[in-house]
Amino acid sequence: MSRLNKNRKNVWVALLILTIFPLFLGLLLYAYVGQHNLILYDWFNLDIGFPKNIILVEEFPSWVINYLPDCLWAFSFTSLLFCIWQNESLRIKITLLNIPFLTGCIFELGQKYHLINGTFDLKDILTYIVGIALSRLINFIVNKHLALKLYYND
């Protein structure tokens, strides 16, 4: 396998692990244990009939139900931005960190002023910060220490 083809495979592996998997897991948590007043249900007109008796919702810690999906969303969004703009300057990367944070804040403010279904929670904003920080840390480890480069450079 040529270096270019191997590198393309690494791009897809990184995108799968760092963006698609956490986003899917977060959506699954929302759909399975989440409250049914979420914007997700409005957008897709969802009436998901997951069998609730497989795993009782009460068995999940409250932070898993209330905050992990938001953390995974922020992690996934931030990772996607860093995967796309991997080789950009530090200034651009710092600017990119603001996009998921501001998006999360806009949704929370929309909930506070009843423009979006849901309940405003300052802890959600802190959760976005944790997701963004974890994404940045893991992307750094993957890109620097494991030599998983997202673009082919000669």
Image (cartoon, rainbow, N blue to C red):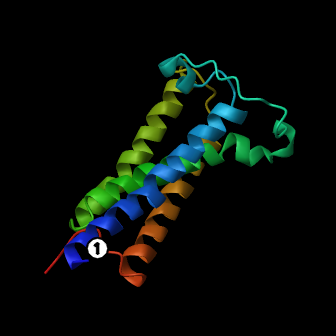
Specify the quadrant that holds the C terminus.
bottom left
Question: Which residue ends up furthest to the front in the rendered image?
Answer: 1
Label 1 crowd (10 A; few <14 / some 14-19 / many >=20): few
Residue at the location (21% across, 67% down)? Answer: 89
Q: Residue at x 65, y 40 (%)?
A: 29
Secondary element at image label 1: helix
Quadrant in which residue 142 is drawn: bottom left
Q: Looking at this view, is 92 or 109 the one in front?
A: 92
Q: Nearer the viewer, residue 87 or 99?
A: 87
Residue 6, x across and y down, in percent: 28, 73
Can residue 14 be spotted in the picture?
yes
Q: Residue at x 53, y 51 (%)?
A: 22
| Residue nearest the viewer, comparing 140 with 142 | 142
Q: Is residue 138 left or right of residue 64?
A: left
Looking at the image, residue 94 sits to the left or right of residue 69; the answer is: left
Return the residue at label 1: 6
Quarter of the image for the N terminus: give it: bottom left
Give x and y (percent) for residue 114.
55, 18
- Three-letter amino acid code of the residue under disc 1: Lys
Point out residue 47 in the picture as x, y percentages from the top left corner. 63, 18
Residue 115 visible, this angle: no
Q: Quadrant of residue 121?
A: top right
- Residue 23 in the image: state x and y as whole percent: 51, 46
